Amino acid sequence: MQCRFIIYRFDPEKDTEPHYQTYVIEAEPTDKVLDCLNRIRWEQDASLAFRASCAHGICGSDAMVINGNVTLACQKLIRDFTTGGNFVIEPLPLFKVVKDLVVDLEPFFEKYREVKPYLINDEPPPEQERLQAPEDQEKIEPALACILCASCTSTCPINRADSDYLGPAALLRAFRYLFDTRDTAAGSRMADLDQESGIWGCKTMRWCTDVCPKGIPVTKCLTQIKSAIKKKGKSG
Amino acid sequence: MDQRYDVIIVGAGLAGLRAAIELGQDTRVAVITKVFATRSHSGAAQGGIGAAISNEEKDSWEWHMFDTVKGSDYLGDQDAIEIMTRDAPRVIYELEHMGVPFNRTAEGKIAQRAFGGHTRDFGAAAVKRACFAADRTGRVILDTLWEKSVQRGIEFLHEFHVMSLLVENGRCCGVCVYDLSTGKIHTLHCKALLLATGGAGKIYKTTSNAMASTGDGLALAFRAGAPLQDMEFVQFHPTGIYKLGILISEAARGEGGVLRNKDGERFMERYAPTIKDLAPRDMVSRCILEEVRAGRGIDGKDYVHLDLTHLPQEEIGAKLAEIIGFARTYSGVDAKKEPIPVQPTCHYMMGGIATNVEGQVIKNAEGAVYDGLFAAGECACVSVHGANRLGCNSLLDTLVFGRRAGKTMAKYIHTVGWPKVSETLEKQSVQKINEACNTSGKERIGAILADMQLAMMENVSVFRHKESLAKTLDTLAALKARYRRVALTDKGKRFNRELMDYFELGYMLDLAETITRSALCREESRGAHFREDFPKRDDKKFLAHSVVSLNESGQPFMWTRPVTITRFEPKERKY
């Protein structure tokens, strides 16, 4: 079928304003949107810039806005849309555009680094593995599917209003380590998160959960952080 | 960014990151990666990492070693395989201590599952050896190692593409890189350089590999004069999603899934009576295509079914969450209720840059090494996988030999001074790149790429033959001629992907030729290399590594290196 791709173009080196450029290609209903972008680049316009790598929703490179929704270009097929073969493609909101669909994710990773995204445990490890009950491992399991594609953080309305807010992706990572029974820094982690720019920035709007391409219950995980901090506050 | 580092690591997958972590805090190290670190293809690994830690069933490293040797069709070097399988339990505990969130047994130990070709008692029956985190084992290990690097403050040069190595008088002294975000070319000097760039699956039309898997490190080393070993051995994973090649992990069969032909028959029972669907990948891929050739593909087409419908739904929903999602998104199939259409997909390069067990790149038949040049992971050939890699041995390979390369480099940099890089070499390299950027013609990168991928898929994949291989060499020569007439149309500096595509295609054309040439020379069938005109293994003539390198006039020539055999004499390979 014939598809029209209306794509956001902006090269800060030579453009003063962003503009939209239209490309027409033949595509199969089972083609991914990413396949179409690749074809446009290879067959029509090599200067179109976007990021992509694994092409099956596991590396997190190609989050962008397709027909108004934040999603992964490799995870959506042409047949998933009911827009009569018309596609408007734009870069992720919130971040500065480097070129076309490529945005500067450094602020995203800066927030991520703030939550100390690594296991803290200074006790000498045993000779073999540390034991962990399967139900304890399952508690952090939902967060392990995160691919750092930035879909949630770029969508979150709080993030758009408050640039200090850690945002759902960084908080989800905090969740992953806070509830890992092998981590010994829960106290200081909770103190770090117990702020308006931390966990209390979350107003349970659930946009993060709706948009997550990996189906992670982000809001639910963030709510568990809130409960843990409240419980700790009560117990002094 | 500095101009000078003690160590430069190219590639931020598991091998590169593990090496970086091994280097002391006082070492100036930069990790160069053309994609953001967490986008590295190690993150796509699904099923598990092998180690005989006996958490579920009695196991031993000797059985793991035997399975790996037999799986390699006796082409793996047994000294290297022994190092890897003996080191495996330590690797697992180290990962666990770093924070890798493995699945657990009821007693809280690391859970293990069955995997293709892994057995107890030297082949008696399948054994649970693969340590795993659902079906995202690579993802969680990559995240953990990256986060460890963040904690350590390791410097990353993200979205930098390597265009050439600076190698002079047998010493590697740096790299020429292209900064994708600015379009600037830089030369960086170092005492030691590690290539950890992963695989090259994009040479083939159907692959499980990422767009970034274009074999850069292999081609860079080859062009700098280093030998590539066992390049004909390309693994086709039996279960890629039909038409797309997206990986459906062997864990699906490890958890009890079975392959069925159009009659619903579990055909692997006929081919491998002992371990059936858990036979090694080379065999299962051939069996699928044999079924297709015999007219037993689904609807007479070139695929079969992977059936998970008889398994406990809740359990596989959790343990195989990712692949169930892939089947739903890309095939529209609910894998809990209907079978997944699958066919073999290009997955892994057993061959690569010839190295010794310390990660040093070898330069000649005597085993002499380059100064300052190292390689680890999929781009290297130690060789632990020989003619066919077993599932869940690749993550292990990256971590064992990434660490060893890190250790070797840590010592090495204290024994040498800074290299003197001759200005001519540097200028020549930059000039070459500039010339390439200003090429003019009418050919398009995408068209040449598609032609190469199709030719390799049709003629140099699971089944091979003298005539089709020879024909492919001609095709590749013609494609190279077209490559020299490519028109580069994007004249912008920022995020110029076309330039990266152009270099990647050049790398892949060189590698496609080494694969085809090596396949033509090996007139026998072994592991993943099956010659229809020579269907038997021939140990008398071919129990040796094939090696290809450039001669003084820049032409590829073939030679061999002996295989190291210590504990297990070659036998007929039956499962």
Image: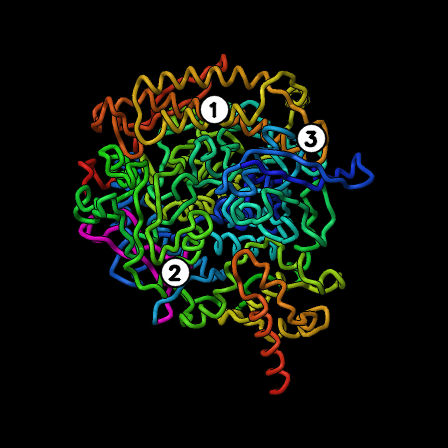
Q: On the rendered image, what quadrant is the C terminus of chain B found in?
A: top left
Q: Is residue A183 above or below residue B551?
A: below
Along the line of sight, the residue nearer the viewer: B196 or B440:
B440
Q: Foreground mark, 2 or 1?
A: 1
Q: Are marks 2 and 1 on the same chain?
A: yes
Can you see residue B358?
A: no
Along the line of sight, the residue nearer the viewer: B32 or A94:
A94
Quarter holding residue A154: bottom right
Q: Secondary structure at mark 1?
A: helix
User: Label 1 amino acid?
Assistant: Asp
For disc 1, the marked residue is B451
Q: Which mark is residue B185?
A: 3
Q: Is residue B515 left or right of residue B407?
A: left
Q: Secondary structure at mark 2?
A: helix
User: Label 2 amino acid?
Assistant: Lys
Quarter holding residue B128: bottom left
Q: Residue at x 46, y 37 (%)?
A: B199
Q: Are marks 3 and 2 on the same chain?
A: yes
Residue A229 in the image: state x and y as whole percent.
62, 78
Q: Is residue A227 above or below residue B336?
A: below
User: Label 3 amino acid?
Assistant: Ile
Q: Is residue B552 above or below residue B265?
A: above
Q: CA distance from mark 2 to mark 1?
A: 39 Å
Q: Foreground mark, 3 or 2?
A: 2
